[in-house]
Image: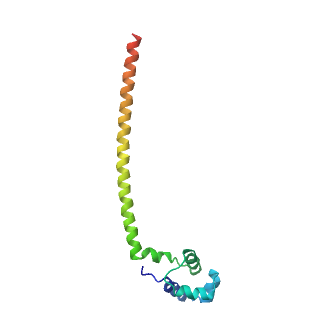
Amino acid sequence: MGINIGLLIWKEMKVKGMSREQLADEVQISKHRVGTILKSTSIDTDLLTRISIALDVNFFEYFRRDEDLAKIEIDSGTKHNQEIIDLKCLNGDKNKLLELYEETIKSQKKIIASLENLTKT
């Protein structure tokens, strides 16, 4: 993955004019931990959520745009589309079966009515 989350957080801090101390207070972690995060290429999702809220930036969107993850999303979408097509085919087959059952029931009702007429005479 080509995302340097620490660098992205640092850039947003600079844009917002937020110091390490301020972010540490907002996120309720130590100033030292903020320094470690800013040098890091990975981060805990709970912590990233809190930082996103503190800086009013959805950092998860950067991961969503990552090429490797985007490929997964495209592959997943293709897979889901095929599943939808398969389900539509199954639904069509089910409807055909229901029509055949209805025709069978109508035929059986006619036979029953005929047999009842024969027993009455």
Q: Nearer the viewer, residue 120 or 79?
A: 79
Residue sitting farthest toward the top: 121
Q: Nearer the viewer, residue 42 or 20?
A: 42
Where does residue 34 sit, x and y in percent of width and height?
58, 86
Specify the quadrant of the image occupied by residue 113.
top left
Residue, x 37% and y 66% (percent of image)? Answer: 75
Q: Quadrant of the N terminus?
A: bottom left
Residue, x 56% and y 75% (percent of image)? Answer: 49
73 left or right, relative to 36? left
Q: In the image, is residue 115 above or below residue 16? A: above
Count of numbered labels shown in the rendering: 0
Q: Quadrant of the C terminus?
A: top left
Where does residue 33 sit, x and y in percent of width and height?
59, 85
Residue, x 49% and y 75% (percent of image)? Answer: 60
Examine the rendering and report whether any part of residue 104 can be seen.
yes
Q: Nearer the viewer, residue 11 or 79?
A: 79
Q: How is the image coloured?
A: rainbow
Q: In the image, is residue 73 above or below residue 8? A: above
86 left or right, relative to 8? left
Specify the quadrant of the image occupied by residue 102.
top left
Where does residue 109 sit, x and y in percent of width and height?
39, 25
Examine the rendering and report whether any part of residue 16 can be seen.
no
Q: In the image, is residue 55 above or below residue 121? A: below
Q: Nearer the viewer, residue 64 or 34?
A: 34
Where does residue 56 sit, x and y in percent of width and height?
56, 79
